[in-house]
């Protein structure tokens, strides 16, 4: 039986003139009794945006693979739900 745990990874981006603003992306997961809940947060210019998505039937190991993929590939906040849907077909 899996226990409830949380994993949070953060990716920081520095200011690069007009090319890129400073921001942080946080990718988190929490194991729930019926699956894994994902949360992605974007922090930029003192503003925060976040979204959650619950995936029933997903194991903690599968959730960790997905969170690590999103973090390592710096999946944009605007696209993370589409990427999650694609990854669920693979894991």
Image (spheres, rainbow, N blue to C red):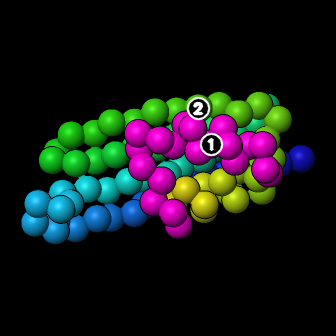
10 vs 46: above or below? below
Q: Position of residue 63 (x, y in %)?
A: 70, 50
Mark carried by residue 26: none
Residue contact between numbered discs 2 and 1, judged by CB atoms under 8 Å: yes
Q: Is residue 30 left or right of residue 26?
A: right
Q: Position of residue 65 (x, y in %)?
A: 70, 59
State whether the magenta stretch is mostly helix, strand or loop.
helix
For residue 4, say whether it is visible: no
Q: Tell me how far mark 2 sits from mark 1, CA to CA.
A: 9 Å
Label 2, secondary structure: give it.
strand
Q: Position of residue 79 (x, y in %)?
A: 47, 41
Q: How many marks?
A: 2
For residue 76, say whether it is visible: yes
The region drawn magenta spans: 72-91
Residue under the point 82% across and 35% down? 57
Q: Which residue is mark 1?
A: 84
Q: Nearer the viewer, residue 81 or 59?
A: 81
Q: Is residue 16 left or right of residue 33?
A: left
Residue under the point 16% across and 45% down? 46
Q: Is residue 44 left or right of residue 76?
A: left
Q: Residue furthest right?
A: 1
Q: Residue furthest left?
A: 17
Upstream in sequence: badge 2 or badge 1: 2
Magenta run includes residue 75: yes
Q: Which residue is mark 2?
A: 53
- Kindly indicate the quadrant of the structure image that contains residue 13: bottom left
12 vs 46: above or below? below
């Amino acid at each position: 039986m899996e226990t409830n745990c949380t994993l949070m990874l953060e990716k920081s981006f520095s200011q690069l003139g007009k090319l890129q603003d400073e921001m942080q992306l946080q990718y988190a997961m929490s194991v729930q009794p019926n699956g894994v809940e994902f949360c992605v947060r974007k922090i930029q210019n003192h503003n925060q945006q976040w979204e959650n998505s619950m995936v029933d039937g997903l194991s903690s190991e599968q959730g960790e693979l997905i969170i690590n993929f999103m973090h390592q590939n710096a999946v944009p906040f605007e696209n993370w739900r589409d990427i999650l849907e694609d990854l669920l077909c693979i894991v």
